[in-house]
Structures are given as structure tokens and as C-alpha cells.
Image (cartoon, helix red, strand yellow):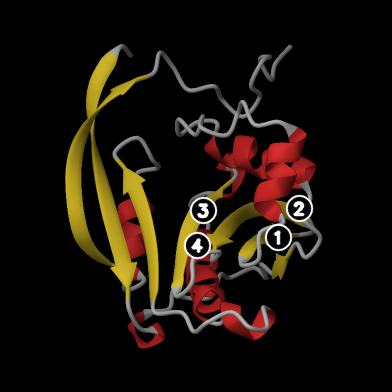
Amino acid sequence: MGGVEITKWYLEQDSPGQIRPAREPATAAPIIRAEVPSPELSRYLYTAVGGDWHWTDRLPWTWPQWQDYLDQPGVETWIAYRHGTPAGYIELDGHEPGLVEIAYFGLLPQFTGQGLGGHLLTTGLRHAWSLPERHPGHPPVQRVVVDTCSLDGPAALVNYQARGMRLYRTETIPYHQAATPGPWPGAAKDL
């Protein structure tokens, strides 16, 4: 894929009352916060979930860059599990007063289509709005935002809107990427 144009959508909520919960998944899927900032864990989730969706901006990050980012007050990683296995995650970036950004969100490929995405997003939105409860001195959240694009999974935009996030801006931008790096950057998974 050479140079193409992609559509980028920006969504928001300005009240926790706007959350429209998804149905609970048929099989238990606990969602647990990774309370100890771990560059190794976060990089694993980033590549495992985003490798097929052109998530490349953090691939060059060094271990200290990951650590510095994760150490910021208000940055949280919540992981969904299926039978003890990480199935997906949502990363909240609440370091800016009054604002929480869903920095990254998604499922590992083998867990898509099982009703986990809506459940994880519902839970993640609730945690975004309650972020000050876990970070004393953090101001109340006024707004939760996310952006997605036409390179993301086909259910991304629909899921955000189904959970009560509303579109506030759309843009078309040029994009240059030869191919997705896949979940195994640097080596094929079948080697």
C-alpha cells in the first residue's frame, strides 16, 4: 500500500451518563488494571493488538520512553482476560487535567467476534470517568475522547458510537505505510 488517504474520526463524551453499556459476554472476561507500570507488558499488548492495524508510532520507543510514559499520573492500562489469557486492553491517558483519552483499545485477533470489545470499552469508559478516585488530587474528568481511523478494525467506530461516544470531527489525511508490521514486528510469527 503506497500513499493513500485515510479517514480519521474524533469522538467524545462529556458525561458518564452518556455511556451505553454493552451486553456482558457469555463467558467471564474479568478486566484488571495493571497497577505496576511495565514497559514489557504494555509493548506486548501494543504489538499483539495493533500489529494488524498499522499501530506503528510506538514501535521505535525505547524501554525508558515506555517507562516515562507509563509513570505519568493518570495513565492506566486495563486488561481483559479470557480463561486467564490476556484477550485485549484499553489504555487510558488522563495526565491532562479534566481530560481522559482512550489512547489505545483493542482485542488480540483470536478474541474478536466474541462480545468482548463492547464489554471492554464499557468498562474502560467507566474507569475513565472514575480516574480521579484512583489518583488523589486529580481534578474531576470533564471529557473522555478517542480517535480512530479507516485503518482500524472494522468494528472500532461502530463500537465507540454504540457505547455513547459522539463524533465531533472528521478529517481525511494522507497516509504512507507499505504494510502492517503484524503482531511480530521484526520477524514472521511462523518462523
Q: Earlier in the sequence, mark 2 or mark 3?
A: 2
Residue 40 x, y percent position in the rendering: 78, 41
Left or right of 106, for residue 134: right
Q: Which residue is mark 1?
A: 81
* Observer-nearest of 159 and 113: 159
Q: In what element is the residue under mark 1? A: strand
CB of mark 1 within 8 Å of CB of mark 4?
no
Residue 160 visible, this orientation:
yes
Please tell me in which quadrant of the rendered image residue 21 appears.
bottom left
What amino acid is labelled 2 in the image?
Thr
> Which residue is denoted by mark 4 in the rendering?
115
Between label 4 and label 3, give the one nearer the viewer.
3
Q: CA distance from mark 3 to mark 1?
A: 14 Å
Dot 4: what SS? loop
Quadrant where the N terminus is found in the figure: top left
- Marks 2/3: CA distance? 17 Å
Neighbour class for label 4 at 10 Å: few (<14), some, many (≥20)? some
Dot 3: within a 10 Å radius of its alpha carbon, few (fewer than 14), some, or many (20 or more) residues?
A: many
- How far from the left and from the top, in percent, is residue 46? 61, 41
Kindly identify which residue carries mark 2: 85
| Residue pictured at 18% horizontal, 36% vertical | 172
Q: Which residue is mark 3?
A: 105
Q: Alpha-carbon distance for marks 4 and 3?
A: 15 Å
Which dot, 2 or 3, sits closer to the camera?
A: 3
* Lateral position of residue 121 relative to residue 38, left or right: left
Q: Which one is earlier in the sequence, the residue at label 4 or at label 3?
A: 3
| Kind of residue at disc 4 | Gly
Residue 14 appears in which quarter of the rendering? bottom left
Q: Position of residue 81 (x, y in %)?
A: 70, 60
Disc 1 marks a residue whose amino acid type is Tyr
